[in-house]
Image (cartoon, rainbow, N blue to C red):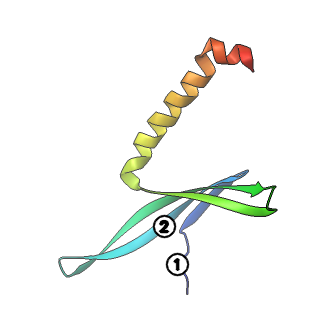
Amino acid sequence: MANRPIKKFKSGSLEAAIWFNERENNGEIVGFKTVSLKKSWKDKEKDVWRNETLNIRKQDIAKLLVILNKVQEELLLNKEDNENE
């Protein structure tokens, strides 16, 4: 049976999934969770669906949120860009 995510969240072409993983550490099996972020889009030239996936660890989520908030802040508050849109 294939490894399946614990939970999935989807909005449009974006999806996040939580996975449970195991690995051996000093002779013991240790469980831990990871997250995959996926974006899907259609390649119109080749008429096929494409996926891009980023796998991150639990401790990366807070850092990623800070970065995304900074990007959003820059895009929303930068007057020059807003005038061109």
Could you tell me how far apart the alpha carbons at marks 2 and 1 are, in whole angstroms? Answer: 8 Å
Instruction: Tell me if residue 65 comes above or below residue 34 in the rendering.
Output: above
User: Is 38 above or below relative to 83?
Assistant: below
Q: Which residue is mark 1?
A: 3
Q: Crowding near pointer 1: few (<14 within 10 Å), some, many (20+)?
A: few
Q: Looking at the picture, how far across and down is residue 56, in whole percent?
A: 44, 56
Residue at 60%, 16% (x, y): give it.
78
Numbered disc 2: secondary structure: strand
Q: Earlier in the sequence, mark 2 or mark 1?
A: 1
Q: Amino acid at mark 1?
A: Asn
Which residue is label 2 attached to? 19
Give x and y (percent) for residue 73. Answer: 55, 24
- Tag 2 and tag 1, C-beta contact below 8 Å: yes
| Callout 2 amino acid | Trp
Query: From the image, which quarter does the N terminus lie in?
Result: bottom right
Q: Locate the C terminus and report the quarter of the image it occupies.
A: top right
Q: Please determine whether, in this image, residue 71 is positioned above or below residue 47.
A: above
The tally of labels here is 2
For numbered disc 1, what is the local secondary structure?
A: loop
Of 71 and 48, the residue lying toward us: 48
Q: Residue at x 74, y 62 (%)?
A: 49
**Quadrant in the picture for residue 31:** bottom left
Image position, residue 81 (x, y; %): 66, 18
Which percent across, then down, holds residue 32? Answer: 36, 67
Q: With 45 as the anchor, is 52 left or right in this view? A: left
Left/right placement of residue 26 relative to residue 66 reads left
On screen, residue 85 above or below 46 = above
